Amino acid sequence: MNLWPCLALLLQFAITANANTEKIVFSAPPTSSIPDAGPSFNNLDLYSLSPERLSVRLALPVAFPEDPLPKGLDSWYLLESLHPGQRYEVRICWAAIQPTAFTIDTFEPQQVFDTPHLITSLAAYSEAHALPASAKIKPRTPGSQQSLLFLRVQSAADYYTTNETLMLHPPLVDVDIILDPYLGNIFPQSLLPTGVYIIVLAAGSWWLSGAIWKRLFSAPKQHTD
Ligand SMILES: *[C@@H]1O[C@H](CO)[C@@H](O)[C@H](O)[C@H]1NC(C)=O
């Protein structure tokens, strides 16, 4: 059977996929009022992830890590309509052919508004990146209650090339940003099919090894009897 080469190949994919994922695990904060900076909050041009929209595919600008930007370029997103206290993970997945170092952080809104370097970075990002109309969501009511977080992704090019054009203008990196709720706060929902697969595989091998043992040890007995 060709099972072993297939399995080895599958494992290789699993390892490759891992190498290109960066993630953060967090608990959703308690609901709080949307800051009463009402109109300006709604004017923030940010992609938003929520239980209704769990992923977004984007091309992120990157910079080489240098003095003013040791972790590369900031980009900002909203995590909305979270369930307070529930555990989530946010993952960034990208292709191995675009070596990039990502740093992911989440912040509560008040923390961003109270921290000068965070609010400056957020405002600059929102101003520089117009959101396509299709990505706009309905306006939030100022003062309404929500469990909400800001997500900051820092992206730095993680390679060196003698090609000067590439060093001066590193190309955009294609990424998937994925919000993944944990089931019962212990297991990422998107891993459920993998979990079921592993359980079926384990149960199957347990049954098979039992059957083999039985054959091995019952066959000679019939001869000696
Ligand atoms: C440098 O990279 C750019 C962009 O990929 C490419 O168009 C160009 O041909 C490269 N130059 C050299 C000298 O390889």
Image (cartoon, rainbow, N blue to C red):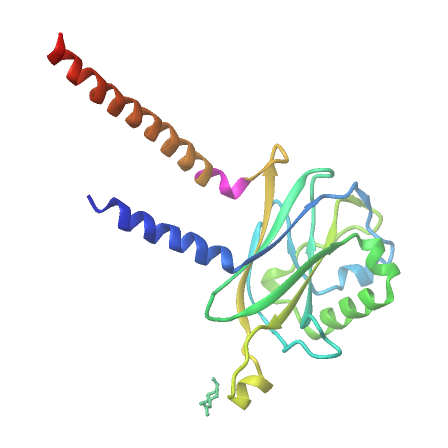
Q: Position of residue 152 (x, y in %)?
A: 70, 61
Q: Nearer the viewer, residue 126 or 62?
A: 62
Quadrant into which the C terminus falls: top left
Residue drawn at x 74%, y 79% is: 67
Q: Nearer the viewer, residue 190 or 203?
A: 203
Q: Is residue 104 left or right of residue 220?
A: right
Quadrant into which the N terminus falls: top left
The kind of secondary structure the magenta stretch mainly shows is: helix
Residue drawn at x 33%, y 29% is: 204
Q: Position of residue 192 (x, y in %)?
A: 49, 38
Query: Is 89 in the magenta?
Result: no
Q: Position of residue 7 (x, y in %)?
A: 32, 47
Magenta-drawn segment: 189-193
Q: Position of residue 4 (x, y in %)?
A: 27, 46
Residue drawn at x 32%, y 24% is: 207
Q: Is residue 90 left or right of residue 124?
A: left
Q: Is residue 217 left or right of residue 176?
A: left
